[in-house]
Amino acid sequence: MKKQIWFLLPILILVSCQSGPEPLVASKADLTPSVYPISSAIEPGSTETGLYRTVTPFEHANVGRTHVYPADFGGSLSVPESNAVVVRQFSGVHEAPYNIVTRNRDELFLFGGTQGRRDDAKGPYVTRFDATTGQVLWRTDLRDTKALGEFLWPGLVTAHGNGDLYAIHGIRIVRLDPATGTVRGEVELPTPDGFAPEDITYNGFSVLRSGIIVTKSFGRRGAEGAGFPPSIVVTVDPNNLTVIDSYQLAEGSAGRLTVGLFQGDEYVYVPGVRNIFRFAVNGSELRLDDRWNVSNYVRPGQGAASAPVVMGDWIVFQTNSGPSTAPLSVYAVSQADAGLRLRTEPFSPGANGFSFIPSALTVDPETMRIYSMDAGRGQIACIELVGGERLETRWVVDQTTMNHTSLVGPSDARVFVSTDAPNLLAARAAARAAGRQTAGYEEQVVWRSAASGEELARSDFMPPKLIGDPLAPGFFGVWYYLGAAGDVYELKVE
């Protein structure tokens, strides 16, 4: 049967179904542990591990940025043709949305307002939704960044282990009360010498087991002759919001930093434009680890790496976060010895001759599988680290995404979730020729078997997301999709 669209006020439901006229809306009986065992088992609450105990406390699932979420796939793995995708639209328009986090089962928090040069990106805000009804409960505007001429770049919101929300934007971290949105505190972060504060932003942060926040600056080109600024790595006390320690690198870093655990010690991995750095954390003191450094990882024609990802004893990353003429490389580097590096090129450049993926890859530490994507090539690949000795490609599918991907489900039945924009490359080429921003394409959300790449479900076409945006799961099999125009959607496979 042809896919159908059902309009029900006050929500919009899009249903991809094979038979029957009724929308597939979940009943209370569906929300049982037998149907959603992973998220049902979570008892939301504060922890001493840095992040709140919930499905999605952080932009990339956890501080290792694996993108493996404690969430469920509600569809059938064995009979994919029986799966249907239900979509519900939340209330309001939320300009330039970036990331969503969960907290308690009925709580949902959105950060937005700082996505690049977009006309509607005027400054950061955090909004709370009722996850059951989709209604807005409060919105807190944090700063009129655009009016002040400050650097617009995606920050984020995180559900901290102490129970509060923390958001980062520009050179500031703020602490918010999740119940009311009241700002409980704010700290201004340091800027590199010779560069104006309005040219600097701190692009994301991570959290140590102690709860200490670790972040890193990133900047646009300064005054004439100043070039791009070096990055500063900073630790912040989450309780009194004071800077604890800082370290200025010799180069800039555009990708986000990552926290890894190795042999009982915590390390902070920072992707520079020429090197991947590691900091050891002794209490709250940052120390550059001179014994571990990945230098000269960018090959001729390639772009720098996005965020590193922790896969057990390995650090994994991919190059070409910006448009590049050479195939991207996927690296796996031992946390024990940076000299032990494995590399593979799973894709050749696309017909247009370029390779490009602004988002970080996804890894599964339990299966030692890596999920890489190249928007320039229009493909996604599954690569396995075999015996700590080699990287082997398990499957490759034609699918174009510029967004972060995700894994859910038990380790023996993982489901890989990502977007697909089949017309993206054509729309991008037309936009570049006309000197305008990319437009005129749509996206779908696709669920696949992580082991085989087999397609399990696919949504109808939806308005496009902003480039580099994460796709986040919630409790009881739902997913949150943030449209570039400011619409928030909830998706569910049944």
Image (cartoon, helix red, strand yellow):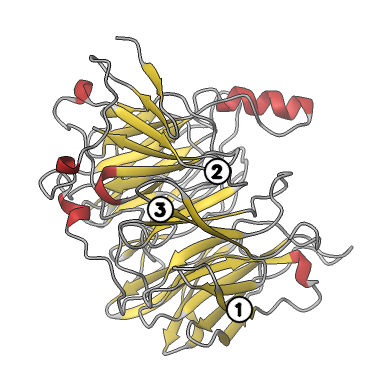
Q: Is residue 189 left or right of residue 84?
A: right
When asked about the image quadrant of residue 108, the answer is: bottom left
Q: Secondary structure at mark 2?
A: loop
Q: Nearer the viewer, mark 3 or mark 1?
A: 3
Which quadrant does the N terminus fall into? top left
Residue 22 located left or right of residue 210? left
| Callout 2 crowding tier (Cα within 10 Å): few <14, some 14–19, many ≥20 | few
- If you read the primary sequence from the N terminus, does the residue marked by circle 2 or circle 1 appear first? 2
Q: Nearer the viewer, residue 411 or 21?
A: 21
Outermost top residue: 1
Q: Position of residue 17 (x, y in %)?
A: 28, 19
Callout 1: helix, strand or loop? strand
Residue 72 picture location, percent across and down: 23, 46
Among the 4 quarters of the image, the one containing residue 325: top right
- In-front residue for pair 252/30: 30
Q: Which numbered disc covers residue 99?
A: none
Q: Which residue is mark 3?
A: 130
Separation (CA) of disc 2 from disc 3: 13 Å
Where is residue 49? Give x, y as percent. 32, 76
As shown in the figure, which amino acid type bears the numbered disc 1? Glu
Under mark 3, the amino acid is: Asp
Other-residue count near label 1 (Cα within 10 Å), few / some / many at <14 / 14–19 / ≥20: some
Quadrant of the image containing the C terminus: top left
Q: Which residue is mark 2?
A: 92
Q: Residue at x 48, y 86 (%)?
A: 239
Residue bearing mark 1: 186
